[in-house]
Every structure is written in C-alpha cells, then in structure tokens.
Amino acid sequence: PEMTIIMGLILLFHFFAIFDIPHVMDTAVRGIQDMANGGPVAQALRPFLKPLALNLRSFTYLLMQLLSTVLVVPMVQSCAQAVDCVWDEDLHWVDVLRRNYTVEQLHLGAVPTVQCYSGPHLKLVILMWVAVPAYLLLLLPYAVCSGDAQYINSKALWDMKIWKSTNAWRLASKRKATDMHLGFLHPYPSQAFDTLAFELLSKVALPVVTTWTTSKPLLQMSMVSTIGFFLWFFSVLKAPYVERKWCVLVQDLKCLIFMAMCCGVLTVVLNNPKSSLTMEILVGCFVWVLFGLILKWFFDEKVRVERPNVTVYAHDDFDLAGPVTAAGDDVEAPLLQKREVLAQTGSEE
C-alpha cells in the first residue's frame, strides 16, 4: 500500500508538471471570475464555481510544493527500500534471469516475505525504472524555486540547458530568490539555483546510500561523509545567503555535520563499543567550530561590519513605452529598472 501511494503521487506529479495543471487552474479561476460579466446562468453558477476552483488551485499548488520539497526524502527512501534486495551468496545472476530461485535466496530487505523480481515486485521495479528518473528530472526546476509552481510554466519546464546563464530554470530560481526580502535569511540570488540543486542532489543521494549499504557500515559511513564534505565545501564555494553572519553560521554548522560523519567512520573502524575516543573527538570538533564561529562573528571585520546591498525594482521614473536595451536588465522583467539601495541606510546609491 505504501508504494502504491508513492507511485501514485509520482505519476500525479508527472501529470501536473507536464500538462502545467497549476497554470491551467489559474486560467480556470480567471475565467470563473469573468463570469460576473456573463449572462444570468453564468452569474448564477459563479458563486458555486468560484470557491471550488480556488480550493482546487490551492490544493494543486500545495501538492506540487510538498512533492518537490518536504516529501522528496521519504519518497526516495521508500523507493530505495523497494529495490533493496538481499541476495544469497550462492545465487548467481543467471538464475535470477531464469527465475530459478526461492524467496529465501532473494527477498526484499525491508519485507523478507516478498520475493524480489517476481510477480508484483517485478511490475513495481519496471514502473519505477521509468517513473522515478522522470520524476527526479521534472523535480529539479520546481525544487530550485522552493516548490513554487508559479515560476515554472510548460515552456520553461523543457528548457534543460542548465549550463547557460539564460536558462529558464536559473532565471526562475533567481526570481523566486528575489521575490521577497527575508532579512538575514535572504538567499544569494546568483547562487540560488546552484545551492538548491545541490541540496536536492544530497536529499536524493543520502537516503539511497544509507538504504543500499546497510550491510557494509564502513562503505556507508564513507559515502555519507563524502556527501557531507561536498555539502560543506559547496556552501563555502557558493555562499547560500546574502547576510554574512548567517552565511558563516550555516557554513560552520555544515562543517560540524561533516566532522560528525567522519567520527562515524572512525567508530566503524575502531569497532570498540567501550571506546570513548570518538565522542571525545566529536566534542573537541564542536568546541573548535564554536570558538571559530565566535571569532568570526565578533572579531572578523568583514563578517562584523559588512552589510549587503539590496536591489530594489521600480518603474516610477521609467519610460514604460520605450524598449529596454541596456546590458544587465532582467530579461524576464524588461520594463523594470534596478536601483541599488544600501541595506543599513535605505538611501539610493
């Protein structure tokens, strides 16, 4: 039942994304609102259709946001468990192809009574091989916009040339990052796509690694630590937040998480339940990171004094009738003019 629900949600995400259902609902709501200018029948039906359409639109946007953010990890983990089979040492892959094996020789790790690659499980695996990769591909443009389907339409969905600066996914992610100023939580606009895309990759990789390597703890912790290292290194390479103090805090916390993962590797290597060495090293790492964070916050001039600039978009004194051809203008909002405003004073540059 669990995998039936998950595969149903994945296929529903495919349908909503490919046919641009969120924007179809927007069009439907606008059409129902315009029924106020229609005939007597349209005006009579409008009070009943309008709340129904609004609720369906809200449900559509909420479902797309959940399926591209908080539900990604549990869904990927369940999919990984669904193909995590336990092989008998004497079983050869040729016997698997010939379907010449028993449930004791090849069964599902999470449910030992289920025989792998046979009957319903074989159908599930075939469906997953098609649906899950497509889901992960369609998931990326929504994930880099924090699940907000307003920024991804049917045309932008198929612009997959993410290595280009004019890619629709990159521009949509930047627009979402600059939609509202969030203070110290405001993301770095030019790094928003890379940051969220790498976080999505980590969300997918971690549950898969931890599920498929349970029988090999050293390999498991080594791969988890590698993912943790790249998470920390990428946050240092591409600052996730504009506010320097908050950015330093996030980077140091990811560094501490990576150190904790390394302590997990050491625990597996020592294989001594009575040893307290790993815990002592972990406490030392925590103290070192905390001490370094305090030094940066209160003694590093760049972190303590530096305040970011805020980009304000306005068209008060702008000629809306004339075309915009100046370099650097936002191609998705060509009629808007950019003005730099100092965050600490609010005055124009």
Image (cartoon, rainbow, N blue to C red):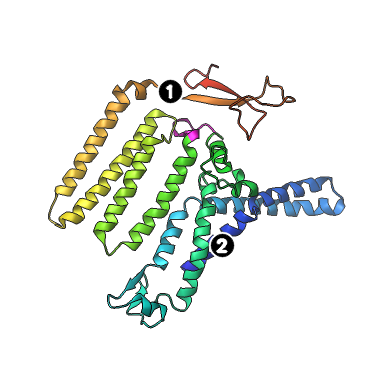
The answer to whether residue 12 is left or right of residue 245 is right
Which quadrant would residue 207 be assigned to in this image?
A: bottom left
Residue 259 shows in the view: yes
The answer to whether residue 283 is left or right of residue 302 is left
Residue at numbered disc 1:
307
Residue at numbered disc 2:
11
Q: Amino acid at mark 2?
A: Leu
Q: Residue at x 47, y 51 (%)?
A: 70
Relative to 104, is 276 above or below? above
**Toward the viewer: 66 or 198?**
198
Relative image position of residue 298 (x, y in whole percent): 30, 24
> How far is disc 2 from disc 1 in space, using C-alphas?
45 Å
Nearer the observer, disc 2 or disc 1? Answer: 2
Residue 67 shows in the view: no
Q: Residue at x 66, y 26 (%)?
A: 325
Q: Residue at x 54, y 26 (%)?
A: 311
